[in-house]
């Protein structure tokens, strides 16, 4: 900022004064420092230190030749772990064995050593860790819009009635969904209890008797493969092809220019729950389980909707596609043999690491989308073009986990081994629209074309072959339980361990708990009431009016990918293994205006919907809802949103 002449002179003077004052202060400090230095007459005497160096070694001169017979040496060498992929990594110090160099294990050494002398090797093997995650994702949207620029004398139903209807529909879907993931554990001890309760429930499931529902329940090999809506197929359906027309991405680089349009969109919302769990946590070619072995894979998929539209227009004028739902499941298990090492024969050395307690790999993912989008529109067209968008909402939950652990040659489990993979998916849609038109109408109404999509994938690499527990593995478990780092000699001769020179053994005192659970729920209420006065839009060329009150997409997509190797599992207790697939669909044709039972509302909805959203509001009562019409056009067409 520039100053005037007088201000510049004053500022310059003040600056010079400050500089001179600072120089004076520094001069005073410097003089004090110089005075202190003058007090010292001179430096002190130097410190003299005598250093004496001695050594027990002396040079004896050059001695050619080497007496091999008198040479012997013993030392401990820490061998670095071989470079391996993550599943082959190991941990924790174990046996120290003295072995002749002629039988060294096939481990990398920095240099080659001659075939004489005795050396001691210490192998390092790391124990596994545990992991437990709980991911809860939720979206709640209330988007009940009211728009009106004309009073057509139509009596509209309060949106609270449709709230009650979609809640009742969600309750129906909840009773139809029989595959429930385990309850969230309160502590570590509850993980195994909740998992076993879920397994026992899944093992005794029966198809519910719900009138009008299409139900398919499969167990064992019948549940394996690609199954869509109860039918086996070779190819999984493509989501892009199944989307509603207005939701499909356009292939045109530039938008098409056509005749002027009047568009009213009260639908075309999209809900997405997507979750992926990938684990390669704990495995071995041989597993000895002293307790029980339980392995269950379960998929439950439910689609429930009501799409009964009404209109006062002749049926031939309305262009409408149908709402459709898809339940798609792919349960796959593929072999994955351990790679050959190039070594032939059984183990020559044993390395043991141990865990006191349980080893846990538990992942819960719960994803919920709830939305009310019940719009009330009373409109007349006066402009050349109109675009009124009261829907087009997007709710997305996404989660992706990738967890890598350790592989061993032999795992001995003192307790139980529980392996549970469960996916539960539910979609609920209420799309009962009421369209009223005054005057002639030559446009299109899309009140349907909704998609309810459940897609589940459970992929497992590595086949577990179950066998009864041999005595020598039981003895080995007893030895390890007593603190020994040795195994029974017969274990070293097990054909399943051929090709393993250094046997990496993991002993777990407690249980092995592998629980992967995904639950996904979409609930959408899109019951719209639209009244149109189209005569003002008519012209010699005809009006181009388009109403979209459907075209919603409810999508659940879940994948559990469990990577491992082919294993021989010796079981000392009980064995239980099963795969289960449940797919159900229900198309409701009940009049939503007479549905009022919400006593058994789905647990998820109760969790997220406040009391004032479920009950009928005190204001408005059972009277008709009429739009408030203003003489002036509103600055914000969304200003009258019902919460």
Image (cartoon, rainbow, N blue to C red):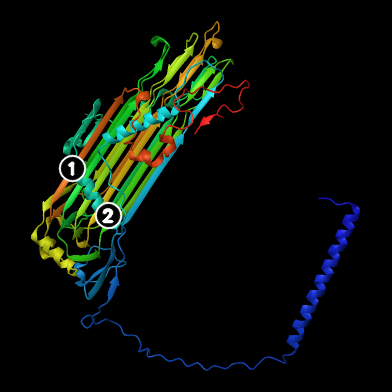
The reply to whether residue 239 is in sight is no
Residue at position x 11%, y 51% in the image: 467
Question: Which residue, given by chain and number where applicable, does mark 2 sit on?
Answer: 190
Residue 203 image label: 1
Q: Along the polypeptide, which appears first: circle 2 or circle 1? A: 2
Q: Position of residue 206 (x, y in %)?
A: 18, 36
Work out whether residue 588 or residue 158 is closer to the camera in this orientation and state it: 158
Work out whether residue 304 or residue 574 is closer to the camera in this orientation and state it: 304
Q: Where is residue 230 in the image (x, y as percent from the top left)?
A: 23, 29
Q: Where is residue 51 in the image (x, y as percent from the top left)?
A: 50, 92
Q: In this view, does 102 lie above or below 166?
A: below
Element type at marker 2? helix
Q: Which residue lies furthest to the top in this view?
A: 540
Question: How many discs mark residues in the rendered view?
Answer: 2
Element type at marker 1? helix
**Is residue 240 toward the left or the right of residue 561 in the image?**
right
**Is residue 134 toward the left or the right of residue 478 in the image?**
right
Q: Is residue 199 above or below residue 71?
A: above
Residue at position x 73%, y 86% in the image: 37
CA–CA distance in space, label 2 to label 1? 20 Å
Q: Residues within 10 Å of mark 2 (few under 14, many from 20)?
A: few
């Amino acid at each position: 900022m520039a100053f005037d002449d007088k201000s510049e002179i004053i500022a310059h003077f003040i600056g010079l004064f400050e500089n001179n004052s600072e120089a004076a202060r520094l001069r005073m400090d410097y003089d004090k420092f110089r005075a202190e230095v003058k007090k010292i007459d001179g430096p002190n005497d130097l410190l003299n230190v005598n250093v004496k160096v001695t050594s027990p070694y002396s040079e004896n001169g050059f001695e050619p030749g080497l007496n091999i017979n008198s040479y012997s040496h013993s030392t401990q060498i820490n061998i670095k772990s071989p470079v391996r992929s993550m599943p082959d990594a190991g941990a924790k110090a174990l046996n120290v064995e003295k072995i002749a160099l002629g039988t060294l294990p096939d481990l990398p050494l920095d240099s080659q050593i001659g075939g004489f002398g005795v050396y001691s090797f210490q192998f390092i093997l790391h124990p596994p860790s545990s992991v437990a995650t709980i991911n809860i994702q939720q979206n709640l949207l209330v988007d009940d819009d009211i728009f009106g620029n004309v009073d057509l004398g139509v009596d509209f139903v309060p949106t609270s009635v449709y709230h009650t209807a979609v809640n009742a529909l969600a309750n129906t879907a909840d009773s139809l969904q029989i595959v429930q993931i385990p309850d969230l554990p309160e502590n570590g001890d509850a993980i195994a209890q909740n998992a076993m309760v879920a397994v026992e429930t899944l093992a005794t499931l029966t198809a519910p008797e719900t009138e009008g529902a299409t139900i398919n329940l499969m167990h064992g090999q019948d549940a394996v493969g690609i199954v869509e809506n109860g039918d086996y197929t070779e190819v999984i359906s493509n989501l892009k092809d199944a989307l509603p027309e207005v939701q499909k991405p356009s292939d045109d680089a530039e938008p098409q220019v056509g005749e002027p349009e009047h568009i009213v969109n009260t639908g075309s919302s999209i809900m997405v729950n997507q979750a992926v769990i990938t684990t390669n946590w704990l495995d071995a070619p041989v597993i000895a389980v002293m307790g029980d072995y339980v392995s269950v894979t379960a998929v439950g998929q439910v689609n429930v909707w009501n799409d009964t539209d009404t209109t006062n227009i002749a049926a031939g004028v309305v262009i409408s596609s149908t709402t459709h739902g898809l339940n798609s499941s792919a349960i796959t298990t593929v072999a994955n043999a351990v790679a050959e090492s190039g070594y032939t024969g059984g183990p020559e050395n044993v390395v043991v690491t141990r865990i006191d307690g349980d080893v846990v790999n538990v992942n819960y993912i719960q994803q919920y989308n709830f939305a009310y989008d019940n719009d009330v529109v009373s409109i007349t067209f006066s402009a050349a073009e109109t675009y009124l968008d009261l829907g087009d909402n997007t709710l997305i939950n996404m989660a992706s986990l990738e967890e890598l652990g350790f592989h061993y040659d032999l795992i001995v489990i003192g307790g139980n081994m529980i392996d549970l993979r469960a996916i539960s998916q539910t979609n609920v849609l209420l799309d009962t629209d009421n369209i009223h038109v005054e005057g002639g109408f030559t446009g299109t109404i899309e009140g349907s074309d909704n998609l309810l999509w459940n897609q589940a994938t459970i992929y497992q690499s590595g086949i577990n072959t179950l066998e009864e527990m041999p005595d020598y593995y039981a003895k080995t478990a007893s030895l390890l339980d007593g603190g020994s780092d040795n195994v029974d000699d017969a274990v070293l001769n097990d054909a399943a361990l051929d090709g393993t020179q250094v046997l990496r053994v993991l002993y777990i005192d407690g249980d092995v708990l592998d629980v992967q659970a995904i639950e996904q729920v979409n609930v959408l209420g899109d019951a719209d009431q639209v009244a149109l006065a189209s005569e003002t839009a008519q012209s010699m060329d005809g009006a181009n009016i388009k109403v979209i009150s459907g075209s919603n997409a409810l999508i659940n997509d879940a994948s559990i990918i469990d990577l491992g190797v082919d294993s021989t599992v010796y079981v000392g207790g009980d064995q239980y293994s099963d795969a289960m697939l449940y797919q159900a669909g229900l198309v409701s044709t009940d009049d939503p205006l007479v549905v009022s039972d919400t006593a058994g509302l789905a647990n998820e909805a109760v969790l997220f919907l406040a009391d004032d959203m479920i009950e009928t509001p005190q204001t408005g009562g059972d009277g008709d809802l009429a739009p408030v019409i203003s003489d002036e056009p509103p600055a914000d067409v969304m200003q009258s949103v019902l919460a």
